[in-house]
Amino acid sequence: AQSVTQLGSHVSVSEGALVLLRCNYSSSVPPYLFWYVQYPNQGLQLLLKYTTGATLVKGINGFEAEFKKSETSFHLTKPSAHMSDAAEYFCAVRSDTGRRALTFGSGTRLQVQP
Amino acid sequence: GAGVSQSPSNKVTEKGKDVELRCDPISGHTALYWYRQRLGQGLEFLIYFQGNSAPDKSGLPSDRFSAERTGESVSTLTIQRTQQEDSAVYLCASSPTGQEYSPLHFGNGTRLTVT
């Protein structure tokens, strides 16, 4: 079975500060991992994904995430937050056995303070 | 090009009525998914279609929920005898293939309110 845990339903940072959104997964086989972002009143869009190869993946808008198998983690980071980063972020996992659909975490709402 | 289109964008219905939600996937996408997002919560998987294979219905919460898809085109999600707990945003997504690494493209959702 696959599952995702996102620690912290709300995260608040100051503009220019480091953004760190945590995601831990459970999967019985090597997973495919995704981060999606949902801006206010918009649909979800893909931020970045890990499939195979390099464990540090870069996405849009300066975000990146690192796959750490030993820690079963896929935390999302950005060195310097911008006001426009305020949104809800969802981590998702998919494995190559069993259910074909993505399993999503419960989401983390990021607030950026001026 | 056109993205995933869902209609209606908003639906208010009375408890006990049936509702039908529509999803137009991106042309050529063989995989189609329905998810439900309750207020303040994450996405809950409902059903998955892949080409002509039997759909994965394992996420449907009750037999009041059903979905159909004709070929690789439009899908409809039907909720019979709606209940207040059905109030949520229903999201449709499509993907070029059913492969595990293939990202999903989401529509903007249908916000369902059951009064």
Image: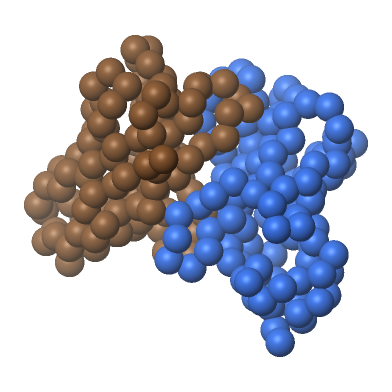
Chain colours: A blue, B brown
Q: Estimate the x, y position of residue A41 in percent, counting from the top left.
A: 43, 66
What residue lies at 83% left-to-right and 75% top-to-bottom? A17
Residue with the most extreme front position: B1
Which quarter shows the N terminus of chain A?
top right
Task: Count the labels in the image.
Answer: 0
Which quarter shows the C terminus of chain A?
bottom right
Residue B6 appearing in the image: yes
Image height of B57 relative to B8, above or below:
above
Q: In the shown orientation, is residue B61 left or right of residue B100?
A: left
Q: Quadrant of residue A37?
A: bottom right
Q: Estimate the x, y position of residue B22 in percent, counting from the top left.
A: 23, 41
Question: B105 or B28: which is nearer to us?
Answer: B28
Q: Estimate the x, y position of residue B35 in percent, counting from the top left.
A: 41, 43
What residue lies at 62% left-to-right and 31% top-to-bottom? A94
Residue B33 appearing in the image: no
Q: Quadrant of residue B24?
A: top left
Image height of B8 relative to B63, above or below:
below
Q: Quadrant of residue A18?
A: bottom right
Q: In the shown orientation, is residue A96 left or right of residue B87?
A: right
Q: In the shown orientation, is residue B28 left or right of residue B105?
A: left
Residue with the most extreme bottom position: A114
What residue lies at 57% left-to-right and 35% top-to-bottom? B103
What residue lies at 79% left-to-right and 66% top-to-bottom? A19
Q: Estimate the x, y position of residue A11 in percent, counting from the top left.
A: 70, 71
